[in-house]
Image (spheres, rainbow, N blue to C red):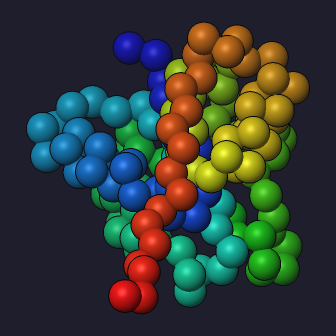
């Protein structure tokens, strides 16, 4: 099984929560690097939960980056390569808004990742309507 790299933006982290919980509950061996982009630590959903999974399971690495906090920024090719040395042979799963997915496709193309190794899912989150 090829290593996996999960890239999520904002509320796009939500589907990965169910996936990681299932994989860990089933004791499935993991080689997963998850890089998550959000605005701030305060607005990032499930941040502590993912950090706990990363601390407890050696096959799961979680790296959050916050676009509105100093010294951090958006996910880049250099960030992916430094956190996941196996990036060239990994399968990618990208979840977020259309703009996030587009940006990540550009980053992955620049890294030379073949499009067939990239799966995407648009996830805008949910809206509450005042009725």
Q: Which of the 4 quarters of the picture holds residue 129?
A: bottom left
Left or right, 97 with reference to 28: right
Quarter of the view holding residue 22: top left
User: Residue extending furthest left?
Assistant: 26
Residue 8 lies, with reference to residue 115, above or below; the image says below
- Which residue is located at x 38 percent, y 14 percent? 1
Estimate the x, y position of residue 55 in percent, counting from the top left: 39, 60
Q: Residue at x 85, y 73 (%)?
A: 71
Is residue 36 visible to us here? no
* Placement of the C terminus among the 4 image quadrants: bottom left
> Which image quarter: residue 113?
top right
Please say whether residue 29 is visible from this viewpoint: yes
Q: Is residue 48 above or below residue 6?
A: below
Q: Kindly identify the residue that appears in the image at 64 percent across and 68 percent down.
A: 38
Q: Is residue 119 left or right of residue 102?
A: left
Query: Residue visible at 67% across and 46% down?
Result: 98
* Residue 118 horizontal side relative to residue 39, left or right: left
How many numbered tags mark residues here?
Answer: 0
Residue at the far front in the pictured view: 131
Q: Residue 119: give x, y in percent of width and height.
A: 53, 26
Say whether residue 120 is left or right of residue 109. Answer: left
**Of residues 18 and 64, the one drawn nearer to the viewer in this rendering:** 18
Where residue 8 sits: x, y (%)? 57, 51
Q: Nearer the viewer, residue 82 or 111?
A: 111
Horizontal and vertical percent position of residue 121 = 51, 38
């Amino acid at each position: 099984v090829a290593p996996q790299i999960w890239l999520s933006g904002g509320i796009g982290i939500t589907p990965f929560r169910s996936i990681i919980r299932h994989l860990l509950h089933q004791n499935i061996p993991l080689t997963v690097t998850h890089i998550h982009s959000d605005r701030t630590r305060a607005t990032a959903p499930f941040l502590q939960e993912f950090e706990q999974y990363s601390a407890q399971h050696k096959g799961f690495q979680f790296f959050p980056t916050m676009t509105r906090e100093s010294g951090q920024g958006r996910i880049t090719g250099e960030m992916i390569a430094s956190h996941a040395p196996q990036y060239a042979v990994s399968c990618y799963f990208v979840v977020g808004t259309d703009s996030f997915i587009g940006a990540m496709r550009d980053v992955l193309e620049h890294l030379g990742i073949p499009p067939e190794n990239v799966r995407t899912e648009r996830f805008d989150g949910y809206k509450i309507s005042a009725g």
